[in-house]
């Protein structure tokens, strides 16, 4: 009897950004690079947006892609990123959420531009939109880029440190759904809701709170996690029967998150990713 190897996925990375949000590479370049390094499975998980999936090359085999998104949400006034994996991108709830974020981020940019003008650094919205690209999902690095091009700062990181970082004088909170709403939208789109980089949460106790809201898994491997966090989250998932995923959060070669490689996952995580993929395929995708 031939025993088929149940773990058909060996090399994966389930957290990659493109220039549809704040990454550097186009969706096609991300796919090409994943193929070059021999990945079996990836997810492109842009912030609050899934346009990358309209821009993929026709032929991607043998690479497999599980549709994903990294959704911004709020819990106890702090930011929580939830990965939606295996999403039905035609889900009306999901499309409504994407639209709300698109509009909300533009309104936020307008408010930030007003604050920057008051600080003596006039820029205009069209410049920011030009950097953001045709769909115009505006994220703070786009504003930082325009500040840099005007010579108001010497680097994008200086723009964050002095003006538009979370405690900066030109910062405006982006409009956000609650964590519960984000999980609900992901589930309505037949996806799996995974806490992204849970080790970065403002309070470690939030992980348990958010799990109770019906989360499906944790991003156990992430470049921000040290070995003891990886071990801790692995145990937590095992005990609670949650999925374990991993991704490098790649944004670009010269960005803070610059790893584009397979996740160095344990057998336990690898098995869980295979289970998630099989479950996704079982859902009729
Ligand atoms: Zn994130
Ligand atoms: Zn990310």
Image (spheres, helix red, strand yellow):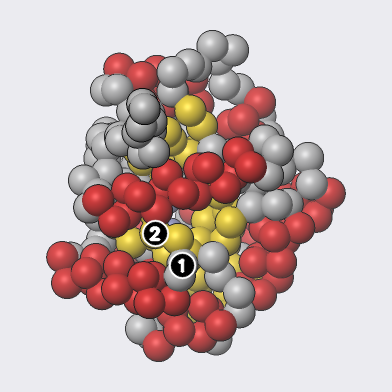
Tell me the distance, in whole angstroms, between the alpha carbons under discs 2 and 1. 7 Å
Quadrant in the rendering for residue 72: bottom right
Front-most of residues 283 and 16: 283
Q: Residue at x 67, y 35 (%)?
A: 285
Front-most of residues 190 and 23: 190
Q: Which residue is mark 1?
A: 242
Instruction: Return the residue found at the far top.
Output: 59
Q: Residue at x 78, y 40 (%)?
A: 90
Specify whether 98 is left or right of 47: right
List x then y, in percent, for residue 258: 26, 41
Question: Can I make out residue 5 in this image?
Answer: yes
Q: Is residue 52 above or below residue 144?
A: above
List x then y, in percent, for residue 130: 59, 32
List x then y, in percent, for residue 199: 32, 71
Is the residue at mark 2 in contact range of ligand 1, meaning its CB lies under 8 Å from it?
no
Q: Is residue 64 above or below residue 274?
A: above
Q: Residue at x 63, y 42 (%)?
A: 282
Instruction: Return the residue found at the far left.
Output: 227
Specify whether 147 is left or right of 116: left
Q: Secondary structure at mark 1?
A: loop
Question: Can I make out residue 49 in this image?
Answer: no
Q: Secondary structure at mark 2?
A: strand
* Mark 1 burial class by Cα count in 10 Å: few <14, some 14-19, many 20+: some
- Number of marks: 2
List x then y, in percent, for residue 43: 48, 39
Specify whether 108 is left or right of 204: right
Q: Which residue is mark 2?
A: 244
Q: Residue at x 17, y 72 (%)?
A: 228
Q: Is the residue under label 1 in contact with that under label 2 (CB below 8 Å)? A: yes
Q: Is residue 270 above or below residue 220?
A: above
Which quadrant of the figure contains the N terminus?
top left
Quadrant in the rendering for residue 215: bottom right
């Amino acid at each position: 009897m031939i025993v088929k190897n149940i773990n058909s996925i060996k090399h994966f990375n389930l957290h990659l950004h493109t220039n549809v949000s704040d990454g550097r590479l186009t969706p096609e370049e991300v796919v090409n690079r994943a193929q070059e390094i021999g990945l079996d499975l990836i997810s492109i998980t842009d912030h609050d947006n899934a346009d990358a999936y309209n821009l993929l090359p026709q032929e991607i085999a043998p690479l497999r892609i599980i549709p994903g998104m990294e959704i911004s949400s709020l819990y106890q006034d702090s930011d929580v990123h939830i990965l939606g994996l295996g999403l039905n991108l035609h889900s009306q709830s999901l499309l409504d959420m994407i639209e709300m974020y698109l509009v909300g981020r533009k309104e936020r940019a307008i408010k930030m531009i007003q604050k920057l003008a008051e600080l003596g650094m006039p820029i205009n919205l069209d410049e920011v939109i030009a950097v953001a690209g045709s769909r115009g999902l505006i994220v703070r690095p786009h504003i930082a880029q325009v500040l840099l091009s005007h010579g108001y700062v010497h680097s994008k990181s200086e723009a964050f440190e002095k003006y538009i970082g979370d405690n900066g004088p030109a910062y405006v909170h982006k409009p956000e759904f609650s964590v519960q709403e984000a999980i609900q939208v992901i589930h309505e789109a037949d996806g799996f809701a995974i806490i992204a980089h849970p080790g970065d949460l403002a309070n470690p106790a939030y992980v348990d709170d958010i799990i109770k809201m019906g989360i499906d898994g944790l991003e156990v491997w992430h470049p921000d996690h040290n070995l003891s966090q990886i071990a801790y989250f692995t145990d937590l998932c095992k005990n609670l029967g949650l999925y374990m995923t991993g991704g490098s959060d790649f944004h670009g070669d010269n960005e803070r998150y610059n790893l584009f490689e397979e996740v160095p996952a344990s057998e336990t995580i690898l098995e869980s990713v295979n289970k998630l993929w099989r479950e996704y395929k079982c859902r009729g995708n």
